[in-house]
Image (cartoon, rainbow, N blue to C red):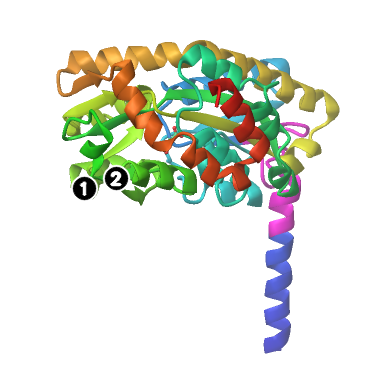
Amino acid sequence: MKRYTKYAGLLFSLIAVFALVGCGARGGGAQGGGEEGTYTIKFSHVVTPETPKGAAAEKFKEVVEEKSGGKVKVEIYPNSQLYGDEDELQALQSGAVQMLAPAGAKFGTIAPQLQVLDLPFIANSTEELEEVVSKDSKVGQAIYNNEDLAAKKIKVLGLWDLGLKQFSANKPIRKPEDLQGLKMRIQSGSDVLKDQTETWGASTTPMAFGEVFNALQQGVIDGLENAYANLYAQKMNTVQKYMTESNHGYIGYVFVVNNDFFESLPPDLQQAVTEAADEATVYNREIAFQKDQEAKKKIEEAGTTEIIVLNEQERQVFKDAVVPEVWDRHADVVGQDLVDELKSREGI
Ligand code: SIN
């Protein structure tokens, strides 16, 4: 009897898991609770709705709900309120959520090639960046067609921008030596970010985005690298006296859907999702850098933080310390062909 109860329990759990993964969030059934033929997408992310990712997620929702005639509904969960960096990819793969747009670094353990986005100085300006990470570029193709993601049944719908990264700390950073002795938060999952930051002389603390503000406030870490849009949205300027505009790297998002869920949609709704994703991607690219500059202005206006803008020579010192050595050290993971492409753009 005891054994029977054990097997019955196991069978029940398996049925529950298959129901969750196989049906996604289809309506009209036990999961969705909505009308037959309607589908609910849970879209989880870790930033505020006003940021370039948050706004693009809202755009996706608006367009797909309109294109599908209300048959696809999107529930957006911002600010790590449903899942954080540490568990959102697991939630996607189990079908607990259907969509995410994590930064490339966050895929480090399941699709290590995406760390190509973390390589320092992959572009020298936002204009150049748009070429390097466009859908048709070598980098873009490596992400859209990533085999590790496909093997895990994760479908790439877009590549979104946050922006170029700056340093933030409680002391002025003008040269790599200024990072020595500082405990810098890096995004979890990226060996490239660890290598880059330690090469400049700082120690690194990988940490989920949702924990960074408290860690800064409590002195667990001294600083971080990020784009102005995120630094302002999380009020990090209120606990950081200095930011250094170094434009030393990029944060890009890989907008993904659980492929089992996607394929469970009828063809017309798959098309609605794909078209809405394309529109949201175009929208993100239109607004990201503008939002980033608005955030910089707001940080300046708040008067809490001095922004140090590196001149070309000062920026070059940071660059010379890591390019091409850090690129070369990770070429086996991110792809020698992609590193060669970046080098040819730089004339090296
Ligand atoms: C995000 O913008 O999604 C978070 C980036 C980070 O972890 O720094």
For the N terminus, give its image quadrant.
bottom right
Q: Which residues are magenta?
A: 17-41
Q: Amino acid at mark 1?
A: Gly
The numbered dot on residue 201 is 2
> Can residue 33 be seen from the camera position used here?
no
Q: Quadrant of ligand 1?
A: top left
The mark nearer the N terminus, 2 or 1, is: 1
Q: Main secondary structure of the magenta part?
A: loop
Q: Nearer the viewer, residue 289 or 210?
A: 289
* Horizontal and vertical percent position of residue 298: 26, 15
Q: Amino acid at mark 2?
A: Gly
Q: Secondary structure at mark 2?
A: loop
User: Mark 2 vs ligand 1: CB under 8 Å?
Assistant: no
Q: Residue at x 54, y 31 (%)?
A: 253
- Quadrant location of residue 39? top right
> Is 91 left, or right, of 82 in this rendering?
right
Residue 24 in magenta stretch:
yes
Frontmost residue, 12 versus 214: 214
Disc marking residue 230: none
Residue ID at (67%, 18%): 278
Task: Tell me residue 83's x, y (percent).
Answer: 48, 45
Q: Local crowd at mark 2 within 10 Å, few (<14), some, or many (≥20)?
A: some
The quadrant where residue 257 appears? top right
Indicate the position of residue 86 as horizontal and vertical percent values: 47, 50
Question: Are the residues at dot 2 and dot 1 in contact (C-beta closer than 8 Å)?
Answer: yes
Label 1 sits on a secondary structure element that is loop
Specify whether residue 111 is painted magenta.
Answer: no
Task: Give the residue pinned by disc 1.
Answer: 181
Residue 250 versus residue 180: which sits nearer the camera?
A: 180
